[in-house]
Amino acid sequence: MLPEAVHEYSRALAHQFDDAGQQKEAATLGMWVFLVTEVLFFGGLFATYLVYRNWYPEAFTAASREMLVWAGTTNTFVLITSSLTMALAVHAAQTGSRRLLMMFLVITMALGCVFLGIKAFEYYTEFVEHHVPGLGFQFEAAQFQHAQLFFSLYFVMTGLHAIHMIIGLGIMSVMLWWAYSGVITPEYTNPIEISGLYWHFVDIVWIFLFPLLYLIGRHVHG
Amino acid sequence: MAEHILPKRIYYTIFGILVFCTYLTWQVAYFDLGPLNTIVALAIAVFKATIVVLFFMHVRYSTRLTWAVVLGSVFWLGILLALTMSDYLSRGWVPLS
């Protein structure tokens, strides 16, 4: 049996807000302002990528061909599926189905773990193949230095993305607890909704990382 | 609460489009389109990001203030990329002495 839902006035509507709509607006806006800082945080890395990619296109193409395309593609599907289950979790929260909400949160977290598992396997493969910059890095001599730049950017960008995923799993764990303990009601879904905004944002970062890191060298034959 | 609960049908539709676009990005990468390869890949990525923002993140149904903040992030990202590249891409255009 699930515990009784908490119908606590102070929880559903904090005293500084006129009504629930204003409270929701404030929560959404606050999360988006945070996401703007995240856009510019990752934006700096994408700008770095853009500069070096333009300076050393051959090395970037050659290094990108060493990526495991099946892993990157699978992970893209895993993440967009987790975005769907996250959206369905928000829907379940809004319509008051706690069991569905908890189920979708668990599925979202499970997919997040699958993503991290595949990513860990990729890192392991790259370590074994000497593609980690600075740690006995090996690559064809002509592109040696510039390929290290590509792999440095690859590890920093996917690493920071993975850290965001891990933080997302932490947030979802709290949401799961709040859903279970009855904090989340159809009148108070803000935590689920703004956690969802974060999860979708992390998905969007991957939507750009996938083609830029895994696919840029595929059309070159031979 | 006067809020908009989207029907699940919309989420499934968006998911279907995202899956199709991912498949498209992956397949089109193996065709040699010259410099267009990156442009096509990024165009699809921008489209995917846009529908995620509009529907999964509910911005389409949000207030104009939220719209302004979201568009602001795109605008500032544009400044970041445009000013950076205006320097790096134009180096060597004018010979120095």
Image (cartoon, coloured by chain):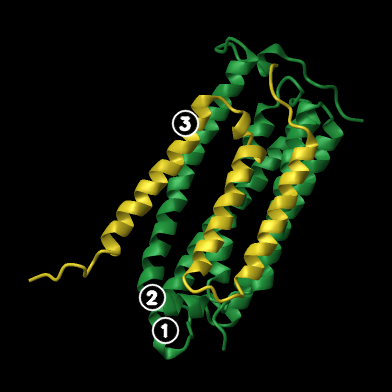
Q: Amino acid at mark 3?
A: Ala
Spatial CA distance of label 3 from label 1 is 44 Å
Q: Which mark is residue A56?
A: 2
Front residue of A202/A222: it is A222
Q: Quadrant of the C terminus of chain A?
A: bottom right
Looking at the picture, does residue B21 appear above or below residue B63? below
Looking at the rendering, which quadrant does residue B62 occupy? top right
Residue tagged 3: B68
Q: Is residue A116 visible?
A: no
Residue lying at 46% horizontally and 52% vertically, measured from the top left: A42
Dot 3: element: helix
Spatial CA distance of label 2 from label 3 is 37 Å
Residue B48: percent from left, percent from top:
61, 51
Residue A20: percent from left, percent from top:
64, 16
In the rendered image of this protein, which colour is used for chain A?
green
Q: Amino acid at mark 1?
A: Gln
Pair 2/1: label in front: 2
Residue B39: percent from left, percent from top:
50, 62
